[in-house]
Amino acid sequence: MNTSRVNKKEMEDFLIIERIVNGDTELFEILMRRHNELLYRTIRSYIQTEADVQDTIQDTYIKAFEKLYQFKNNALFSTWLVRIGINEALQRKRKAHKFRTIALQQYANVLQIEDKNIMNPENRTMYKESYCFMEKAIDTLPEKYKIVFMLKEVEGLGISEISKCLNLSNSNVKVRLFRARIMLKDSILKLTDYSNIFEFGDAKCDRIVASVMEYIYKQQSLKQL
């Protein structure tokens, strides 16, 4: 089948799923590309090691594909997928804890950012430092608050959809989101090293010192004439 003839943007998830179940398996790529970022951010809320995150995403998609015939159109596919992703992430965490294999490592490109091509090198560097700082702050949140914050503030899901994804009441989601925001503010303050704010050392200090001393020496020389 030629997938280029399919209007991918306009096809609803359940229509794509129906066709996949009926044999158009290549259309599963559409679902993956459509929900990759949501699934990544969901799993990243539970697992920090990038390799484990990607393995869990792959396991989630495989399980979702194998169970796709069980999907009922009484909920969003994204909700159904997020639940599978969370279960897979928690299973991997339990296994990793048992064998002591989880290791912290750096990761990149989590938060959705603007097209960096329109930025000059200086702005690109500042932007990268900014979102890396926010990622570090978000990582300090406890797991149950991090997932709510990621789904709401980063992914933009509604309260009701988050409650379905996590099997929580709407009010519980709101409470956790409120607490997550408070904890995030505290984390940002703790991560900020105020001792380096508006610092005036190294080259800047040397320039001023050299300039002032040069002026003093010139004045002294004039007096001696």
Image: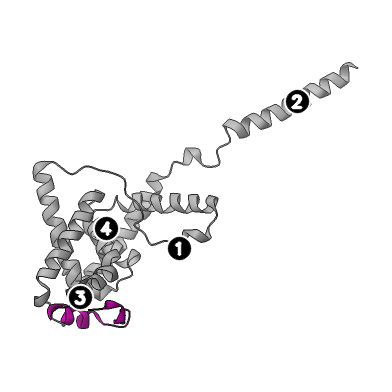
Q: Nearer the viewer, mark 3 or mark 4?
A: 3
- Which span of residues is magenta-colored? 1-22
Task: Give the answer, above or below, for where 136 lies relative to 212.
Answer: below
Residue neighbourhood size for the residue with mark 4, other residues' Cα within 10 Å, grouped as few (<14), some (14–19), many (≥20): many
Mark closer to the chain start, 2 or 3: 3
Specify whether 63 is left or right of 194.
left
Q: Identify the mark at residue 214; answer none if there is no mark.
A: 2
Amino acid type at circle 4 is: Lys
Q: Residues within 10 Å of mark 2 (few under 14, many from 20)?
A: few
Q: Is residue 134 magenta?
A: no
- Of labels 1 and 3, earlier in sequence is 3
User: Could you tell me the amino acid type at mark 2?
Assistant: Glu
Outermost residue, right side: 225
**Residue located beneath label 3 in the image:** 77
Q: Looking at the rendered structure, which numbered label has been put on residue 114?
A: 1
Residue that badge 4 annotates: 146
x 42%, y 61%: residue: 113
On-image quarter of the N terminus: bottom left
Q: Earlier in the sequence, mark 4 or mark 2?
A: 4
**Residue 164 seen in this snapshot:** no
The residue tagged with tag 2: helix, strand or loop?
helix
